[in-house]
Structure formats: C-alpha cells, structure tokens
Image (cartoon, rainbow, N blue to C red):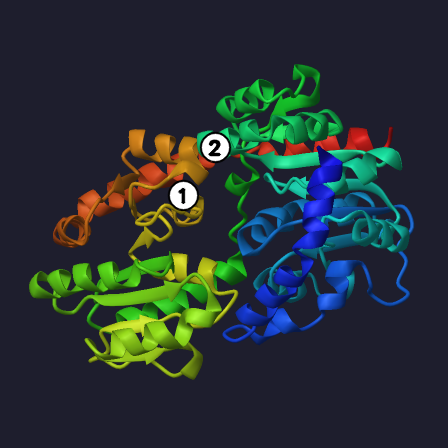
Amino acid sequence: MRYLYTAFFYLITPFILLRLLWRSRLAPAYAKRWQERFGFFGHVRAQDSIWVHAVSVGETLAALPMIKSLMQRYPDTPIVVTTTTPTGSERVKAALGDSVLHVYAPYDMPGCVGRFLNRVQPKLAIIMETELWPNTVAACHRRGIPVVLANARLSAKSAKGYQRFSALAAPMLSQLSVVGAQHHDDAQRFYDLGLSQQQCQVTGSIKFDITLGEELRSAAQDLHNDWADCSGRPILLAASTHLGEDEKVLQGFHRILEQQPTTLLVLVPRHPERFDKVADLCRQQFTIQRRSEGGRIEGGTQVLVGDTMGEMMTFFGACDMAFMGGSWIESGGHNMIEPAAWGKPVFTGPSLFNFAEVSRLLIEAEGMGVVDTPEALASEVCRLIENPDQAKAMGENALAVADANRGALDRLLAIIDQQFNR
C-alpha cells in the first residue's frame, strides 16, 4: 500500500507545485525556499540532532517550551525544526532565531525524505500532534531513528479517515516508538487503529504549560491601557477567525454596539493573506484602525484589525473576553487554553473537535461558553459587560482549569529523555 501511495504522490507533484504558486498570490513566501521541500538546503549538517516537526503556528507555539527545555537539557545537541507553512517558519525564527536550524519539512516521498535525513542525521525525531507521513516514519524506522509523536491528538473524524486507509496507517503506527497522547480518548482511538498499548502514554496537553512572564504581562497591561483608554471601554477579542466567520463576528458586533456602544472589537484573522480583505470588510461597516499602522487607538475607533504576527498572546492578556475562531466553521476550533491561562472569559462556536477534552473541561467549569450564532455571542458579551462579577468568575473558572492541568511537558520530556538516551 505504501508503494501505491508513493507512486501517487510522485504523480501529483506537478499539482503540488502549482498549489504553491497559487497560494503565493496572497502569501508570496510560499514561492520561496521550495527546494527545501524536496530535501535540498545547502551543505548544513547536524549529526546526532533532535528533529522537531511542527506544521504551522499552533503546533510551533505548543512546541516552543519543549524545544527550549531540550536546548537546556542537551546544550551540545543541534536542534532542527521543520514546518510546512511560512507562518510557522516566521514563528520559529522570531522565537528561536539562529539557536536552531529551521527548514521546511520534506515532502513525503522517499527521495525528499532521504536527502533531508542525510543532511540532518537526527538521533531522535519528534512529531507534534498528528502530522504523520508514512514514508517519513518508515525512513526513520529503517535508519533506527526513534520517532516520538508528541502532544498527540486524534479526533473521531480523523480516526475515521485513518481507518479508511488502515492498510497504510497500521504499519506506520507500528513503526512509531512512543505516542504521548493528550487524553485517554485520543489513546483509545490510536489503539483502535492498531497501536499497541506499550507504545502509548497519556501525557496530557503541553499547551496547558504556558508561562506568562513578567515582560509579557507588562506588555499586555500597557496594551490594555491603550485600548481601554481613560473610559475603560470593554474589549472583545475575536481570535484566529477564518473565511466565513468574520462576517458573523461583525454581525454580532453590530448588536453589541446597540447596547454597549463604547465596546472595542479586536479582530485577528487566522491567515495573514486575508489581512487586507478583512480590513476592507470592516471598513465598510465601522471606523477601524490596523495594528500594523501603529499609534494609539482613537476614541472613535470601533474595530482594530490585528494584522500583525506574533502578538496573539499579548492580545489575550489585553482583552476583557475572547471569542475563538475556527469554531463557526467545521475547522475544529483553536487553542482556547491561551485566553484561559490569562483568566479571561472564553466563547467559542460549536465546532470543537480539535480541542474536545479541553473544551469539555472549560465548559463544565463554566469558564467557556458555546455560542451558535452571532446573536448568541452578542447576548453573552453584553451580559458579561453588564455584570462584571460574572465576567470575573468566568475568567477565574477558566484559569483554574488551565492551572489544574499543567505538568504534561514534564511527562513528555521524560519520554523524550528515555528515547534519546536509549
């Protein structure tokens, strides 16, 4: 089955390149460094390195505490970090600079993966969440490179997809060294696909292990003071919105302004190639400013478009409440642990399969509310603005969940140590 999969991958390579060019229309970085995706990246060698693969921004942010811990544990070991998107690449460079080697992950074809491994020569491979590729795993297994699937999650939807290709998925799973699953439900789905229980440990989600340093807290407070101005205006953050969600957020914001006319909406699209379109959409209906333009927020500004990269954690600290995007479309939601760690009330739509266990904990603790419609979002936001004690209690409930579930990083690092030193 893997041979058929490989042949198919080679056949569609021209279309993959065309897709890169198509995406580069809005995000020019997709047309750059494409050679790395085929395993060509100069003469850099990093023998006995630790290879960490994170797909995009979310996985990269989750991996950063782990990577920094590995740098402290193994100061003489090169760290190689791969991503598949330019935004993930930017996050790696901004957070880690030249302390790690970053390249784009090779396409899952034997030649590409082989060239990559020849140059990097890892002693250990760590794959974040569920970015599993049959040829990559097989190549590592053949070379005796342990593969750790870290912070692993497997939704019921994804499990069904793997089940349809069980002849390809089962051998791949058998070649993994260890799976550090976020929850027992994730582990069970891996077992159902053929993973042995000896290969899996439930570590929890390392996304709970967030450190909010004094510098970050200070920056968030300064930003809050700017946004709230002297009037103490309420601040609603709509974070990581997707195509089809911005209109709904703005629809709900119209209703919020009818009852709370001083409210400021901070709208942050998920993908940078949409920044201009979302800004134009907001400008048609509201008085706006763009974060990239700098300057203080004017009193008459109704919507601030968050069109910068790397500031989301500061935005969570600066807002009064947050709505998480990717949840009003079938995208499975985005990381609601981040606003919870700041002690902010959290709202989300009904699509939550990417964070099923986290969302369950937050909902049961009354730290997060699910809103199906823009009208429901407006109603809940206005309720909290009018009842600050309820808003405070909801934020404290969210923070309690975040604090109670820390410790996954230490459990994951213990697994990595065992595999690295075996």
Q: Residue at x 19, y 51 (%)?
A: 377
Dot 1 amino acid type:
Gly
Q: Nearer the viewer, residue 181 or 310?
A: 181
Dot 2 amino acid type:
Ser
For residue 7, which numbered disc appears in the image?
A: none
- SS at mark 2 in the image: loop
Instruction: Indicate which disc, 2 or 1, sits on the residue closer to the N terminus.
Output: 2
Which residue matches tag 2? 155
Q: Farthest residue toward the top?
A: 197
Task: Please provide percent x and percent y for residue 272.
Answer: 47, 69
Q: Residue at x 79, y 43 (%)?
A: 73
Q: Nearer the viewer, residue 42 or 401?
A: 42
In the figure, is residue 193 to the left or right of 345? right
Q: Nearer the viewer, residue 118 or 285?
A: 118
Q: Are marks 2 and 1 in contact (CB under 8 Å)?
A: yes
Which residue matches tag 1? 332
In the figure, is residue 148 to the left or right of 220? right
Can residue 100 be seen?
A: no
Task: Please provide percent x and percent y for residue 293.
Answer: 41, 83
Alpha carbon of mark 2 to alpha carbon of mark 1: how far?
A: 9 Å
In this rendering, the answer to whether 182 lies above or below 104 is: above
Quadrant the N terminus occupies: top right
Can residue 56 be seen?
A: yes
Task: Please provide percent x and percent y for residue 286.
Answer: 20, 76
In the figure, is residue 324 to the left or right of 184? left
Task: Please provide percent x and percent y for residue 61.
Answer: 57, 52
